Amino acid sequence: MNEFFALFKKELKTCFLSPVTYIVMFFFWVLTGANFFWLLWQLIGGSPLSVAMQMMFGGPLLAIALPIVVPLITMRLVAEERKQGTFEALLTTPLQVPFLVLAKYFSALIYYMVLWLPAIAYLLMAGKLPGVPGFPDGGAVLAGIFGVMLVGSLYIAIGLLMSCLSSNQIVAAISSFAVLFGTALTLTLLAYNSQSPSLRIIGQYYSSYKHMMDFSRGIVDSRMVLMYICNSAWVLFVAIKVTEAKKGS
Amino acid sequence: MIKVNSVTKKYPARLAVDDISFEVSKGEIVGFLGPNGAGKSTTMRMIAAYLPMDSGTIEVAGFDVATQSREVRRRVGYLPESCPLYADMRVDEYLHFRAELKGVNRYIRKTRVNDVKEQCGLTEVGKRIIGQLSKGYRQRVGLADSLVHDPDLLILDEPTVGLDPFQIRQMRDLIRQLAEEHTILLSTHIMQEVEATCQRIMIICDGCIVASDTEANLHRMLQQKTVVEMEVLTSKEEFEEKLKQINGAELRMVSEQPHGWIWVEVETLSPDMRVDLFKLAVEQGWTLRELKEQPHSLEDIFVQIATGEGATL
């Protein structure tokens, strides 16, 4: 367990000392700012509160940004170690592969949650706005943050798996973008645009855009929670197995 | 300390290590010598519990590498060939991180890091960023890292590769100092390095161990054929003619020098040909300027063994 914390601390440090981190942060914060601006316009335009709140965590801008931002966070995690050869140095210490993967996973998840910090600041600001009583709704905000974390945990697990599969960061980033964006787009299209009712139901079950909309309105469906936790867990399991198999290659 | 028992490792395209067995006892300093791609690194990686083997067993300090790999890794300090480091970390920071990762108790971590820094001559550069250090210093950081948890066994994969002659000498001295407290297995394809540092030499070629002995013994085994060099004042033809009087002498090379001198190399199976050659010169009334036996270098031994000439081994 000590090894886990040693690597976890080091990963966090590396992450927050890297320029890429701040470039990603800048663009994501610009997007969340634009998103908030859009939300305010909706309120001014007279949209009901529940609809405006959906914008907070589930706006289309963010739904498009996440499949781009997550690969940028996860691409270097394992691929860089392998490229530099430090992977060998790590695995000849008592550190075990599952702890290696988990330490990297949780450090990335923490950075991902830091990316969402401005959203909380916006909500505090919005609370001070005159003429919008009952905004923001505390429960909905908590559910929204929880939802963001669940979606992020799955996305990061997928990004990490792609980073485990390749020793090239660019390949890792592009393949995770392809998987994340491809599935998110397909499932959202199925959920909202499909003609066949059965496909539509499948889409609604799996589309993270749809889930974010629900979470933002304060709806926490335990089926969704379970789905995200299970999916993240098995993707991480595959990542661990891939890393073990690729040891020495 | 190390027991390797019929270990085989296959890569998809080739057989890297073919059924090797050897033992290294505690306190020994053993050099692994072989051409590039002979299987040195693969063997070391298997001992360091990084690569799984296809068959056979390896025991380090009484622990099985395959089933008790964590215990093995606790006791092994391994310096990989390319000496991989995090270029964006500072030396102190890196060594502390590695010490923590290797389970060095936090109460003694600082002392340990300071000790290995002193041992490896890194005290001055503790605050510097690794990426900005010279190759020699980086190699020392790698060595300090492999020492930080005070391992029983040190595995150094080509520790002097890429260093300048001065740094190589420093690194060798350092390794010799370390040998007092640790068992060391080091690999290289540079002969002088093993000659200078190791007590025992293992020559590996195409995945097989072709010789394993002390340097002196390896010399002795191959000493049967010696080469005598001599410089005399006579003509090439005359020398060739008269040399036939000596049984078993074979002319290996002859070259003409200025002012009528010739430089010859005579190969022979007899233990000492110098006396015969001296007598020949006296008989013929040749003026003799130099006469000496060529020492066998480890390089000869290595080439002979690697090319299969050392059939006696």
Image (cartoon, rainbow, N blue to C red):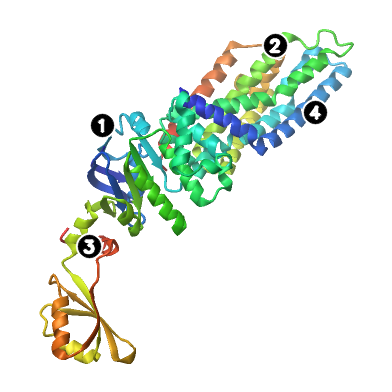
Determine the secondary structure under disc 3.
loop
Q: Nearer the viewer, residue B233 or A212?
A: B233
What residue is pinned by disc 4?
Answer: A34
Instruction: Using the image, tell me which numbered label, if any, was put on residue B62.
Output: 1
Q: Is residue B64 left or right of residue A146?
A: left
Mark 4 to mark 3: distance in Å? 74 Å
Which sits in the foreground, B64 or B141?
B141
* Chain containing mark 4: A
User: Is disc 1 placed on a helix, strand or loop?
Assistant: loop
Q: Which amino acid type corresponds to the residue marked 3 in the rendered image?
A: Gly
Dot 3: chain letter: B
Give the labeled residue for mark 2. Answer: A218
The alpha-carbon separation of the residues under discs 1 and 3 comes to: 35 Å
Other residues around mark 1 within 10 Å, as few (<14) / some (14–19) / many (≥20): few
Residue linked to disc 3: B308
Name the quadrant containing residue B271: bottom left
Residue at horizontal 17 percent and vertical 76 percent from the top = B274
Question: Mark 4 packing: few (<14 Cα in 10 Å), some, or many (20+)?
Answer: some
Looking at the picture, does residue B182 appear above or below residue A238? below
Q: Amino acid at mark 4?
A: Ala
Expressed as whole percent of the image width and height from the top left, the position of residue B147 reads 41, 38
